[in-house]
Amino acid sequence: MVFKSKSAPVAVFDDPESLYRALALTNEGPENLWSHQADVLRSWNDEKLRSEADIALELPTGAGKTLVGGLIGEYRRRKFQERVAYLCPTRQLARQTAKKLTDYGIPNVLLVNEVQSWNIADRARYNSAAAIAVSVYSHVFNSNPALNNAELLLLDDAHAAEGYVANPWKMQISRKDDESAYLDVLATLANAMDPFVFERLRTNSPSGRASTVYLASPLGVSANAMQVERVLSAAVAQGKVSTSARHAWKFLEGHIEHCLIYVTGRDLLIRPLIVPTVQHAAFNNPARRVYMSATLGSGGELERSFGRRKITRIPIPKGWEKQGTGRRFFSFPELTSDLSTDEEKLNEFISETIKRAGRAIVLSPDNRTADAFVASKVPDGFDTLRADEVEENLDVFVENSSAVLVLTNRYDGIDLPDKDCRLVILNGLPANGDLQEQFLHKSLGAVEVLQERIRARIMQGSGRATRNSRDYAAVLVLGSDLTSYLTNLDVQGAMHPEVHAELEFGLENSIDTTSDEMTVRLETFERHDTEWAAVDSDIVTARELHVRKAAPGTDELQRAARREVVAYEAIWAGDWQQSLISIRQVVDRLSAGRGPKRYAALWNYLAFNVASRLASAGDESLHASAEGYYRAARAASRGTNWLSHLAAPAEATASPTTPNLDQLDEAAMRGVLGATDLAKPQNFESQVAVARAGLAATEYKAYEDGLVLLGELAGAAESYTYNDEEEAATPDAVWIFGDAQWVVWEAKSMSKLTGSVGAGNVRQAGGHLNHVETERGTAAPSDSVAFLDTPKPGVLQSARNVADAHVYLVRPNQVLELFDRLVRAWQNVRARDLTSMNIEEVAAIFRAEEVLPTQWLPRLRTQPLRLRD
């Protein structure tokens, strides 16, 4: 026959399960769906969820996520003739997905690489809903999206998509690429930055070249928005910026006053805090979006990343809430007794471990960290491969018996099952994405809002070489930041129970051990014989006992996410009145319970800018509101200096003047004025004498009681101990200075004047703030501290490696000195009659003795236990 006859109608099924029963008759996939796959498909197809535009489902690696997503797409394609696009982060993953879908009998076309290279017939098959398009995020999130007519989007590895989604709205200008463009834009920000910071950046001084990320004042940017836009437009026209920056300008032009601008001595980044995807038709117009991930998490990370107000989550299938994929043996070389103090020996240990493995994948947060690893730890004779060399094909790595694959800020998209790779090296804390992420993490200290992102990267990165239930790989953890992070009990508790148990086991077998012992354990794991099986059961037992717990602040972040998205939609639209209403709701949610105070500080600061803008436009009643938001931002930012770096000329008249008395000092002086019982003659002298004797001795109970009275003398509104001899997790003393500061103590008064502080004591001290937060049901104020009080002269390097940033070493003599100073201040106050004095008068006396909290806290914080890289 010359012509084709009309194709037979495609069979339509009532649900995805029925569809797969038909496909399985002739495909090359599994004979039947696994029960958990069927459970997820039934949940998705439930009548209650059918009308939801945004649905997320979680399936661990190896649980058949691709088949579930493919069946959802194929079911909708067949039944409703919908155009379906299945998006992956990388071309490599897209190719893997297309092959799997073909094996499952699901018609698909692979649309990757440059659009000009696409097969026209394949594109027509997608456009006519004859096949699912398998592509990458960048073909939707683009200034000129090639896939702009989908009716259903399947978004794979959604937990790792923030960078891909935000790219069209991110304009980065590098000083290295074109210094004139960088300086031209910087010059327009003079009114928006602290003059001293601006000058350092402009003159390229050594301090200006540091990695500190500064936020330009939104008020200053808004006041000079037209000039900023003219300079950026000229830089684009003259070809001074990168291709990605040129494309981003198409989205940002006319919206500079709605963006935040982050500045370092090397780069500028212009982007909205939350990308307004509601304005992007290729993503917003599809009637349905399905987000798929092995680690969805909570806390609103998904909503912020995709700019969606609400994403309904389908719970992880029963049976997979504890069980993971494969086995990982976490090892912490920097916690061993010999490697923790000998960097050269550590490098040699890592090198020998790589030699024994033959192939290793190294995941680093940035180029500097990656390059340092290559220079010091890759064995001689080994090939070092980078991401661009394996983007199309991994064979160059997996067929090489002596190779190290070094990836930067990439924790997904590389699958190395079975013998492809048995060694993963996590080299540094994965919290160094774009300048906005660096600002949130390092400058603002709002690590809570990045927790899900960081945990997902760690879980995904550690699982690059464990891709099925029988797979296994060793995971070496390097870098003090990452080591300290993973020893945090809240972090472990928020991990998947399988990973939680593996981390516990790994830490137990790393602390108080030697590198030789660690090598033997790694070799035993590598053999994976009966000797390993004998201890593997311990991990399984621990896994079953663990229940995943949300990290502190998770609930508040999740409740705030919707209002954050609404607020930024209003900002992008220039609806400042609505944005202020929504920001108020964000602040309220972030400030409740154990909410993330430092992230709340940023939103308070944004509210200050919006309120100041509206006040300048005529609503003068908002001047007071603006000042209130600014004070709230400053109070929540205690311990950071990002706000002080915003001493921009544009804010000089809008921000309130600094009060004479710091909020913490004021809280302490109120506590002193309220301690009238302590001031009574019959109480004061006797209590002081007993407390000092306790602090001068070593008996632990008397010492703890002495610390409690010391807190009262310092002005703590509450000062107490737990008096629980059997509960080691409780602090030995807690000082509560209202909402301004908490101080918790771990006192080792009975320790000898010899030896060194170990990792166990440091981890115990680091967990005390979390204990008090849980007990009180609220988050600790920013910059709250834990003091480890001990006479031991030394500190083991392994102890420093597990220390949290808020833990400080204090000596008993320092405690006694503070006690004596406070007693002198109290004696002066009592001589003048405490009941007749006001805050300023009491503060003057305490200031003279140098015992205001802002005076004695710095003296006790001279020895941080955590030493940064």
Image (spheres, rainbow, N blue to C red):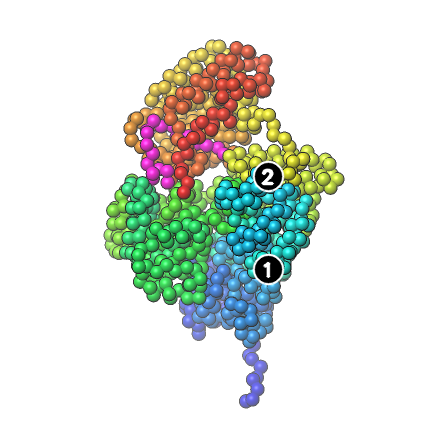
Q: Is residue 73 above or below residue 296?
A: below
Three-letter amino acid code of the residue under disc 2: Pro
Span highlighted in magenta in the image: 782-801
The answer to whether residue 791 is seen in the rendering is: yes
Q: Secondary structure at mark 2?
A: helix
Residue at the spot of label 1? 239
From the viewer's perspective, tell me whether residue 691 is left or right of residue 8.
Answer: left
Of residues 614 and 373, the one nearer the viewer is 373
Near mark 2 (Cα within 10 A), the count class, few <14, some 14-19 or many ≥20, is: some
Residue at the spot 49% in from the left edge and 55% down from the top edge: 160
Residue at the spot of label 2? 195
Near mark 1 (Cα within 10 A), the count class, few <14, some 14-19 or many ≥20, is: few
Q: Is residue 304 above or below residue 865?
A: below
Q: Position of residue 574 (x, y in %)?
A: 69, 49
Image quadrant holding the C terminus, namely: top left
Q: Position of residue 792 (x, y in %)?
A: 32, 29
Image quarter of residue 709: top left
From the viewer's perspective, tell me whether residue 425 is left or right of residue 773.
Answer: left
Image quadrant holding the N terminus, namely: bottom right
Of residues 785 and 4, the one nearer the viewer is 785
Q: Is residue 552 magenta?
A: no
Three-letter amino acid code of the residue under disc 1: Gly
Residue at the spot 43% in from the left edge and 19% down from the top edge: 819
The answer to whether residue 165 is seen in the rendering is: no
Residue at the spot 54% in from the left edge and 30% down from the top edge: 739
Separation of marks 2 and 1 at Cα, in angstroms: 30 Å
Q: Residue furthest right?
A: 618
User: Which label number is shown at residue 867?
Assistant: none
